[in-house]
Image: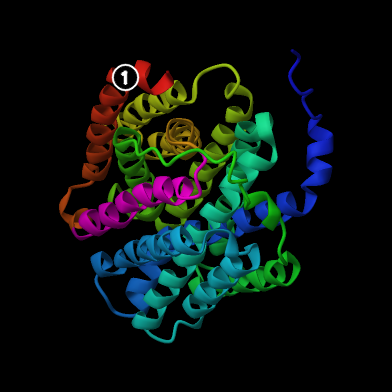
Amino acid sequence: MRGKPEIPLRDLIKTNAALLAISIASFILMGAGTALYGPALPVFARGFDIHIGTAGLLISAHWIGCSIGVGTMFFVGARATPRHVVMAMTLGAALMALGASWALTVLGAVLFGAGYGAATVVFNPRMLRAFGARGPAMLSLLNATFGIGAIGAPLVFVALGNDAVLSFTICAVIGVVITACAGPAGRDATVVASDSATPFRLNLPILLFGAVAISVEACLTGLGPTALINAGLSETLAAQLLSAFFLAFLAARLCLMFMAGLLPAFTLFTLSLAGACISALIAALWLPGVGFVGLGFCAGMFFPTEYVTATRKMGNNARVAPTIIGAGLVGGVFAPLLMSPFLETMGQRGFFWVVACTTGLLSLGALANLRSMNS
């Protein structure tokens, strides 16, 4: 018996145009806000007269907020709309733009992170489900648009004279526009019929891989610019290299659109970890800027490949997406929190040695589990 004919991608895009447009705009905002943390840390440290290690807590505040957002989504599920999650990011950016006090700035990071975390749960499963067989490729496209905001934000930050307040104000204004236009876009795509939903299948190994990989990504995006400054680069050059990092990040996710049909997702995940180890060694031993940009390309593959693998292993139950993303956030919260106080005592390139060791060990573990994860 013949299966159902595959729906042309053009028709799928027409059907899900509202979902696609709001998802892309939201991910651009997510990328812009996240990319501003790194170059803004020295500015906040000077402005509030705090230690750079204390300023690094802003990164952990963001990821703590992400955990809150994801945890909330575990319970509210389909009742959350794109408008809700973008509104949270908008309020967070506005608080950071106020620059009224360090406590309010941290609260802003928590709120932005909560919206960010909820947005990953709102948009990623919808995109994967709405586009059917084309889902993995469209998921890569959506996550690639994160890089557009992440590339542009540090460049805008430098163009504005390293003005963190004005940079976050722009993010807040963009958030207001998206919130006004969002409505309930794509809400129906989250509903899984009870007769098609699979049981919740917990898979601890893939969750562990995701937690460590996302911890590396969080440290690179949040603490990477400070690590480059410690290696002797200027603040302006470090911000520009962060844009280059996200340009490579974007390129990787665009490449995944084509590679997703050629190699299994976990094979691509394993290759990205090995590449990250090599790039970190380049940064530690030779050229920090070149190695950092290489890390951007590899980190761009972490989440989509791990997410596709995890959903295949764990099923399409409504609790699966929050569980996968929540596991990654465990690493995102604690890794910057643990590393930021030691940035100034690691030596000029100690940060990159830590990244090289972590990704090297994780790639060996992934290689050992390659067959079982791809089956």
Residue 123 covered by magenta stretch: no
Give the vertical position of 359 relative to 51 (above or below): above
The amino acid on which the numbered mark 1 sits, given as a three-letter code, is: Leu
Q: Give the camera-side residue of 327 and 155.
A: 327
Residues drawn in magenta: 316-341
Residue hosting label 1: 367
Q: Position of residue 322 (x, y in %)?
A: 44, 52
Q: Is residue 343 above or below residue 272?
A: below
Give left or right: position of 355 versus 326: left
As drawn, the residue found furthest toward the top would be 1
The number of callouts visible is 1
Up-down relation of residue 125 to residue 40 (above or below): above
The quadrant in which the C terminus is found is top left
Please state the horizontal and vertical placement of residue 5, each as a whole percent of the image.
79, 23
Q: Is residue 44 visible?
A: yes
Residue drawn at 77 percent across, 25 percent down: 6
Along the viewing direction, whichever of 176 and 159 lies nearer the viewer:
176
How far from the left and from the top, in percent, is residue 172? 60, 73
